[in-house]
Amino acid sequence: MSTYHSLSRMINDTFYIWRRELMQVFKDEGVLTFLIIVPLVYPLLYSWIYNNERIHEVPVVVVDDSHTGLSRQFIRMCDASPDVHVAFYAQDMDEAKSLISRQLVKGAYYIPSDFDVKVNRMEQATVSVYCDMSLMLTYKAVFQVAQLVSMEMGNEIKTKWGGLYTSREEAIATRPLDYDDVPIFNPSGGYGSFVLPAVLMLILQQTLVLGIGLAAGTARENNRFKQLIPISRPYQGTLRIVFGKALCYFMIYAIMGAWLVVIVPYIFSFPQLASWKPLLLLMLPYILACIFFGMVVSCLMKYRENVMLMIVFMSVPLLFLSGVSWPQSNISGFWQGVSWVFPSTFGLRAYVRLNSMGATIGDVSHEIFVLWIHVAVYFAIACGVYRYQIYLTRQDALERLSEMKQRKKQKQ
């Protein structure tokens, strides 16, 4: 009977803490912002910005020293492409460099005076491409358009001079080895489909840690541990506090997680190759690991503002360390070891492989296994740090009680 009553009391205490934590989430504007509003709005803003996927109509300047029909054809074909727009014509390269330095254009095409002459002599002609390398997406557009137009014009010239009679002969002469360009994992070749799935998973961890940190900071400021743990049995409440808080955050982020990894990619047509079962098997340990990680971090920060500074500072490095936006093979062993501390490292990799690359649950079993290790390790650490917090609260309460007794004696 005593065991039954202990279990019943533990369950009641757990739900009591869950209820108080849930009320605190909706009462604290900062916690409400980071746990609910930011995960709802921030992904929409990011996805909307990158919804075009690729950069189109990049402005360029042309320096045409040839002034021939062939050079004008090259310019027209570049301008006709969806990625480049010929915005200016310059007299010389000095003027073109001035336009680039003022950021009026992102690149320059220079056609030399002997362009047409060399082609008619059956010599190799050149077109110089000058690109602004400060933004790789514009560089890619400017360079690739010039390359594709040069190849297309070269095929036309070979066909014209080949003396061939049938279209089949012309096709073989221009492309003796044909190929099919099939982009895998990112059919649109866009930036959004490439990086945003990983960003969505990172938003889940960062907002969760921020919300837990702010809530814990408020609890410390109000000393709410006194209201939760009786002085007579201080250590019996450790598991109840951890489970109660974790249950509150898990209920909220079960909904936020579905919004971030299922609904937002569907709205913006990001690649979605995984079914609900593999995503569930991944999201369950990932959310739990982020919750317990956030609880540990919140206890290590003295002031609630420190959590915000640290998490915001770490967001971009964590994206790089995950191996999604920067090749994992090019990350040093030390930094790869540092990245193992964060659940996002394995959560991002597994989600991108499942949803964007069509991997099976067996292909990401290593990442899921490591996430469960994170759950166990951070749960144990969270219990330890919360127990220490309870110990400090109990000591403070006992000291105050002793002071009150001494004052009472002195008055008597």
Image (cartoon, grey):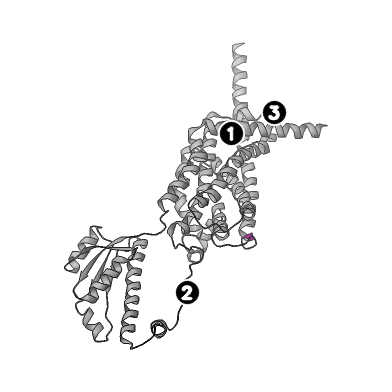
Mark 2 to mark 3: distance in Å? 75 Å
* Residue located at (40% from left, 55% from top): 52
In-image side of 157 versus 339 (left or right) = left
- Say whether marks 1 and 2 touch (CB < 8 Å): no
Which residue bears the numbered disc 2? 180
Residue type at the position of mark 2: Asp
- Say whether marks 2 and 3 touch (CB < 8 Å): no
* Residue located at (31% from left, 61% from top): 58
Mark 3 to mark 1: distance in Å? 26 Å
What stretch of residues is rendered in magenta? 360-365
Label ID, residue 22: 1
Mark 1 to mark 2: distance in Å? 55 Å
Judge by depth and name the residue closer to the eye, 195 or 368: 195
**Dot 2, how many residues are within 10 Å of its Cα: few (below 14), some (14-19), or many (20+)?**
few
* Residue located at (60% from left, 14% from top): 410
Q: Earlier in the sequence, mark 2 or mark 3?
A: 2
Q: Quadrant of residue 67?
A: bottom left
- Nearer to us of marks 1 and 2 is 2
Q: Quadrant of residue 384?
A: top right
